[in-house]
Image (cartoon, rainbow, N blue to C red):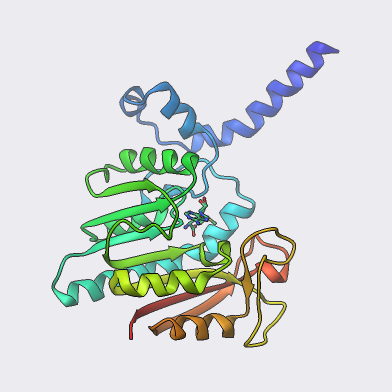
C-alpha cells in the first residue's frame, strides 16, 4: 500500500515536472552558476513564461498561461510606445513597473531600450523570482526590485507600467493621482474590469466573490483615469481567457500621458 502511494507520487511528480524540465534551455554551465535555492526557484512554476524574452520558464498552461497570452502582445506595443514618447522628450528613459510580480514587463522594457526600471511588489517570493530571471536574462545592471507597497514610491520616473494591479486596490484613484505627481511622460495601464455590469458609475469594493480589491466597469475606468489628470492616447480591450466569471474577465489596456 505504502509502496503504491510512493510510486503514485513519483509518477505524478515526473508527469508534472518533465514537461517543465524539457522546456528549460540546455545550458549546463549556466545552471552550475546558480545556487541550490536559485535552482529550486527556477524549477517551480512561474507566473510568466519568459520564453518570448529569451529564457523559457515553467508555467501552468491554465490560468497564468492563458492570461499572459491575452495580455502580453497589447502591453508590449503600449510599452514600446511609452519608451518612444520618452525618447521624443530627449531625456532619460527611466521606468517603474508596479505590481511587477516576477518582473516580466520590466525585463521587456529594458530589452526594448529603457535605461533602467525599478520593479515594485509586496510579495517576497515573486521578488526573488524577479531577481533570478533578471540575472538569467543578463539585465541585472538595468533593473532593481523593491519589496514595498505601490503607494510607497521611492522616486519619480519617466514612464510607468501598471499592469494587473488597479483591481487589487480598494482605492485605485488614489494611486492614479499619486502617479500623476511621480510620472513625467507616459503611463501604461492594464487592469481587469467587469463584463457583468456596464454602468458608467459601477465601482465596488471589495470585488465580488473576493475579500479584497475592487471591480469597476470599463466606462468607470476611463472616467477615473481622466479625472485623475491623465489623457488617454490609446485604449484597447479584450478578455482574459483564463478567468471564467464575467466579473473577472474584462481586460483594459491604456496608454496615458499627463494632461
Ligand atoms: C496579478 S499580479 C500582476 C503581475 C504582472 N504585473 C502582470 O500584469 O502580469 C499582481 C501582483 O501585485 C502584487 N500586489 C498586490 N497588491 C500590491 C500592493 N498594494 N503593493 C505592491 N504589490 C502588490 C501581488 O503581490 C502580485 O504579485
Q: Residue 81, can we see it?
A: no
Q: Position of residue 81 (x, y in %)?
A: 31, 74
Name the residue rendered at 27%, 69% in the picture: 83
Give the quadrant of residue 33. Answer: top left
Q: Position of residue 210 (x, y in %)?
A: 71, 59
Report the side of 150 relative to 245 (left or right).
Answer: left
Closer to the camera in the image, 226 or 129:
226
Q: Position of residue 147 (x, y in %)?
A: 41, 46
Report the side of 2 relative to 248 (left or right).
Answer: right
Closer to the camera in the image, 82 or 118:
118
Quadrant holding the C terminus = bottom left
Name the residue rendered at 47%, 50% in the picture: 101
Residue found at the far left of this picture: 90
Q: Position of residue 2 (x, y in %)?
A: 81, 12
Name the residue rendered at 44%, 77% in the picture: 254
193 vs 135: above or below: below
Quadrant holding the N terminus = top right
Count every numbered label the image shows and give the total.
0
7 vs 58: above or below: above
Give the quadrant of residue 88. Answer: bottom left
Q: Residue 2, can we see it?
A: yes
Name the residue rendered at 13%, 73% in the picture: 90
Amino acid at each position: 500500500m505504502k509502496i503504491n502511494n510512493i510510486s503514485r507520487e513519483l509518477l505524478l511528480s515526473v508527469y508534472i515536472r518533465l514537461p517543465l524540465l524539457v522546456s528549460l534551455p540546455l545550458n549546463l554551465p549556466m545552471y552550475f552558476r546558480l545556487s541550490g535555492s536559485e535552482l529550486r526557484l527556477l524549477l517551480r512554476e512561474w507566473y510568466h513564461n519568459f520564453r518570448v524574452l529569451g529564457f523559457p520558464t515553467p508555467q501552468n498552461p491554465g490560468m497564468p498561461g492563458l492570461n499572459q497570452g491575452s495580455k502580453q502582445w497589447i502591453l508590449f506595443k503600449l510599452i514600446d510606445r511609452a519608451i518612444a514618447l520618452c525618447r521624443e522628450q530627449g531625456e532619460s528613459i527611466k521606468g517603474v513597473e508596479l505590481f511587477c510580480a516576477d518582473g516580466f514587463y520590466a525585463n521587456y522594457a529594458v530589452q526594448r531600450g529603457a535605461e533602467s526600471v525599478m520593479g515594485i511588489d509586496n510579495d517576497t517570493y515573486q521578488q526573488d523570482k524577479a531577481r533570478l530571471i533578471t540575472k538569467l536574462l543578463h539585465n541585472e545592471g538595468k533593473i532593481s526590485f523593491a519589496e514595498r507597497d505601490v503607494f510607497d514610491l521611492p522616486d519619480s520616473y519617466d514612464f510607468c507600467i501598471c499592469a494587473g494591479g488597479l483591481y487589487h486596490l480598494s482605492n485605485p484613484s488614489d494611486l492614479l493621482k499619486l502617479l500623476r505627481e511621480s510620472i513625467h511622460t507616459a503611463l501604461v495601464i492594464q487592469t481587469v474590469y467587469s463584463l457583468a455590469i456596464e454602468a458608467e458609475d459601477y465601482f465596488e469594493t471589495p470585488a465580488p466573490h473576493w475579500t479584497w480589491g475592487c471591480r469597476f466597469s470599463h466606462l468607470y475606468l476611463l472616467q477615473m483615469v481622466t479625472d485623475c489628470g491623465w489623457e488617454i492616447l490609446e485604449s484597447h480591450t479584450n478578455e482574459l481567457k483564463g478567468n471564467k466569471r464575467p466579473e473577472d474577465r474584462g481586460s483594459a489596456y491604456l496608454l496615458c500621458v499627463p494632461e
